[in-house]
Image: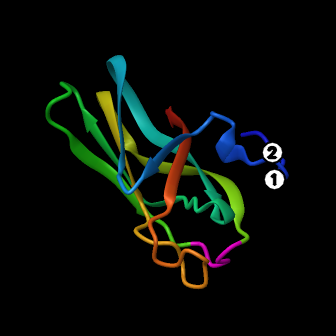
Amino acid sequence: MMELDWSVNFHNTGLWVGYYTSDMVAVIDLGSLQRISSVEVSALTDLSAWIMGPQAISIFLSSDGKSYKRVSRQTYQAPTDAMGEKRSELNRLSFNKKSARYVKVLVEPFKGLPKGHSGEGEPPFLFVDEIRVD
């Protein structure tokens, strides 16, 4: 992952997919059955722009694209610096190696901006730019 120059407003670059008040759901078709053991999701936190990273990420696998089984779920703590925190994080979820053709990634946003933020309690944006399957 590249080092970010925080003097730039990265949420304005067009490199991120943004969500507001809804979960991000992505289904990835690997084209054939593959053995995989991790999924990485890159997310942005820029509290000055009302952007928070994920509250939770869940990974589901399927061989047919119809019936999915959850293989991993990770929850995250809300940022503690109410206004100034800016970072890009690569969130890696690992699990025992499984065979799957389809990978469903569910990213749940936080429901409200943290205490002390100028928009305290208001819904934040969720920005994701990459998903990697290994």
Q: In the rendered view of the protein, which quadrant contains the N terminus?
A: top right
Could you classify mark 1 by the number of other residues whose Cα lies within 10 Å: few (under 14), some (14-19), or many (20 or more)? Answer: few
Residue 81 inside the magenta-drawn segment: yes
User: Which numbered tag is attached to residue 48?
Assistant: none
The magenta segment is 79-83
Q: Please, is residue 105 above or below residue 114 in the view?
A: above
Three-letter code, disc 1: Trp
Instruction: Tell me where residue 83 sits by quadrant.
Output: bottom right
Name, please, the residue furthest toward the bottom: 116
Residue 45 rendering spot, x and y as whole percentages: 62, 58
Q: Magenta stretch containing residue 70, yes or no?
A: no
Q: In this view, does 32 lie above or below 107?
A: above
Judged from this view, the residue extending furthest toward the left is: 67
Q: In this view, does 40 lie to the left or right of 14?
A: left
What residue sits 63% from the left and 53% below the top?
A: 89
Residue depicted at x 55% and y 51%: 91
Residue 126, image x and y in percent?
A: 50, 53
Secondary element at image label 1: loop
Residue at (51, 36) in percent of width and height:
131
- Magenta stretch: dominant SS? loop
Q: Residue 41, position in %: x, y?
A: 52, 44
Q: Distance between the residues labelled 2 and 1?
A: 9 Å
Question: Residue most toward the front?
Answer: 118
Residue annotated with mark 1: 6
Residue at image position (70%, 68%) is: 85
Q: Which residue lies under the disc numbered 2?
A: 3
Instruction: Identify residue type, mark 2.
Output: Glu
Residue 117 place in picture, x, y as percent: 60, 78
When asked about the image quadrant of residue 123, the answer is bottom left
